[in-house]
Image (tube, helix red, strand yellow):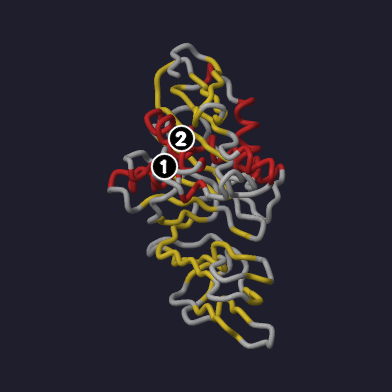
Amino acid sequence: MEQTTAGKYPFQIKIEEGQSISATRIVGNIEGKRLVVTAGVHGDEYVGIQAVREIMEELKPEKVAGQVIFVPVVNRDGFYEGTYLVPEDGENLNRCFPGNQKKSLTWRMAYALEQTLYPNADFLLDLHSGSSYESMEPLAFFPVDAGEMIESFTRSAVQKLSLSYMVQSYAKDGLYSWGAQCGIPAILIERGGKGTWSSEEVAACKENIYQIMNFLGIYPYSKQEKTPVEIQEAHYETAGTCGYWYCNKTPGASFTKDEIVGYLMNDEGQIQQEIRAPFDGVVLYHTNALGVKAGMPLVAYGKIRHGCATDK
């Protein structure tokens, strides 16, 4: 797969006979860092998919230092069926790392991605959006449980992005988070939600990709309109039972300790679950569905890291 002459080189990430994932390697004129950009791990998250499609056309190899591998739609079948799951086995690809060749297709996809992308990455950027029932602020997750070097380098990288929040992450089972556990600096960006996309969100996502390329010295880009606020102690609340979900806050809204962020009510109008803030903080994203089932995500929120100030 390695090329040394400047140009654009489509290739296939082989999963097994008859199954592969399309990707493109863009090689620059001079040596430099190797960036991997993935989108469509969840097939119904469209902003990153379109951003990668556009930037692959825009990027000129002769202006690139190093290499960029783009994977515009990792979960192609899920994309066409409008689902975040891999339709063949109903698995969530981002919960199947590390991969396994002896399990179902999604686990084999994860294995193929690891084997192909990780050895070719000095940095990995994974693009996501809120699901069809989620509203969120633009944010990036960066690993704080994969060693001091990974934490320091990825924190420096996300500080160069124009988005609202940078969230400390302890995840280990996703494409980017398992990559970090394997020693690869990696981050995940979330933009958009509600199962939609817009040209404005795509443009903002493309800007984030250019900002990462600039940080790595791959492609010059100096624009940065805002600096993200760092979030620690992120909490992810889920429904304990089925019911009616009422969130008192919108993404980006602040709250104080002991304030009720949202609550779950039954058919009789009785409160079954109350989300009460354990600290002063901000809402990152929430479920905008009225009806929820047990185990469904409700709201994510976190505490602003000491010494950081919100620009809201």
Residue 105 appears in the rendering: yes
Task: Report which quarter residue 53 is drawn in.
Answer: top right
- Relative to residue 309, is residue 195 depicted above or below? above
Depicted 218 relative to depicted 7: above or below: below
Question: Mark 1–mark 2 contact, CB under 8 Å?
Answer: yes
Q: Residue at x 43, y 29 (%)?
A: 116
Asked if residue 198 is positioned above or below residue 51 in the image, the reply reads: below
Query: Which amino acid type is marked by label 2?
Result: Leu
Which residue lies at the image location 66% right of the left edge and 60% below the top edge? 133
The quadrant the N terminus occupies is: top left
Q: Is residue 312 above or below residue 183?
A: below
Which percent across, then down, holds residue 244? Answer: 66, 76
Point out residue 185 in the picture as x, y percentages from the top left corner.
37, 40
Q: Which residue is mark 1?
A: 99
User: For this rendering, which residue is in front, 3 or 257?
Assistant: 3
Marked residue nearer the N-terminal end (1 or 2): 1
Looking at the image, residue 86 sits to the left or right of residue 188; the answer is: right
Q: Which mark is residue 113?
A: 2
- Give the class, few, some or many, for how many residues have Cα within 10 Å of label 1's Cα (few <14, many ≥20): many
Q: In the structure shown, which secondary structural element does the residue marked by tag 2 occupy?
A: helix
- Disc 1 versus disc 2: distance between alpha carbons? 8 Å
Q: Position of residue 39 (x, y in %)?
A: 56, 39
Residue 287 falls in which quadrant of the image? bottom right
